[in-house]
Image: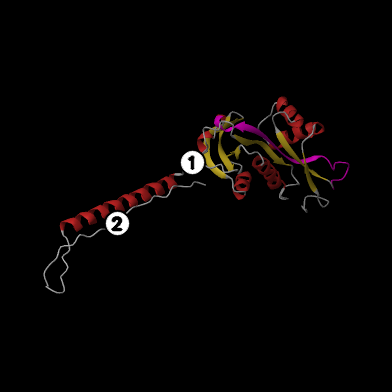
Amino acid sequence: MVNPKLSHRASICYRPIEPSDRQILEQIHCDLFPIRYESEFFQNVVNGQDIVSWAAVDRNRPNGRSDELVGFVTARIVLAKESEIGDMLRYDPSKPDQTLVYILTLGVVDGYRNLGIASSLIQKVVKYASSIPTCRAVYLHVISYNDPAIRLYKKMSFQCVRRLQGFYLIGGQHYDSYLFVYYVNGGRSPCSPLELVTIVVSYMRSGLKTVAAKLYKNEDRKVPKWPKCKESHSLISTTQHRRGLTAECNGCECV
């Protein structure tokens, strides 16, 4: 991997975050994010307490820094029924153990951006979530002005499902947040407004076909057909049997 800002060719590898990473992890969080994280958060990350994490390191980094973090992602498993996106999932309520993976933080240090590191870290999380049979989605928040992150998640097929007004409070000022979701293991969103309209239109068409069929039957009863007899040329009444028309409405499969 080549970046003009680097004096060498990077060789990026990925590994779990370890206790020895704590100091640099705290420093990078402080440099990258406007939000300050508690000491307990970093303690849980480096010790793997209810948090999973991946670190990106550059094995070709000089000056004995070949194992120092240049990127990271942290995430946590949460119960779907207790999450803030419970209403954005179509899941079986009879299975209360269904889960989600929430991305807590994701960052890449300056000089190592545009090398695909963030995308690879996200893929690690998605692969991990997909390996959990009960997991239905990966989700996260992005502050509304972080355009590079928004473009990245959209590029990676995350769906922006909601805008949360005043979600962040930074320096006494409120900022909106976008909620992004990536569904895994058959997890799906409820029907979108467009899909609901599609269902309604389908039912309306089905209803119109049924009404038309009934009217056609009634007309047949009122005005019977009288074919001529070839031999006597008299009119003979006949009873005709018709198959009733049926209309099927296909169910909506939301993606």
Q: Which colour scheme is used?
A: secondary structure
Give residue 17's quadrant in the image: top right
Of 154 and 230, nearer the camera is 230
> Residue 216, how many percent across, how many down?
23, 56
Q: At 53% from the left edge and 34% from the top edge, which residue is drawn?
A: 86
Say if residue 13 shows up in the picture. yes
Of 169 and 83, nearer the camera is 83
- Bin the neighbour count of mark 1 within 10 Å (Cα to Cα): few under 14, some 14-19, many 20 and up: some
Q: Residue 248 carries which label?
A: none
Say if residue 139 shows up in the picture. no
Query: In the picture provided, is 135 more to the left or to the right than 5?
Result: left
Give residue 35's quadrant in the image: top right
> Residue 145, how many percent across, how many down?
59, 41
> Residue 233, how many percent across, how many down?
12, 72
Tell me which segment is drawn in magenta.
60-81
- Bin the neighbour count of mark 2 within 10 Å (Cα to Cα): few under 14, some 14-19, many 20 and up: few
- State whether residue 116 is above or below residue 30: below
Of 102 and 226, nearer the camera is 226
CA separation, marks 1 and 2? Answer: 37 Å
> Residue 101, how many percent across, how many down?
63, 36
Q: Which mark is residue 243?
A: 2
Residue 65 belongs to magenta span: yes
Q: Do the residues labelled 1 and 2 touch (CB within 8 Å)?
A: no
Amino acid identity at mark 1: Pro
Residue 151 belongs to magenta span: no
Q: At 20% from the left edge and 54% from the top edge, which residue is drawn?
A: 218
Amino acid identity at mark 2: Arg
Which of pointers 1 and 2 lies earlier in the amino acid sequence?
Answer: 1
Element at badge 2?
loop
Q: Name the residue under label 1.
A: 190
Give residue 58's quadrant in the image: top right
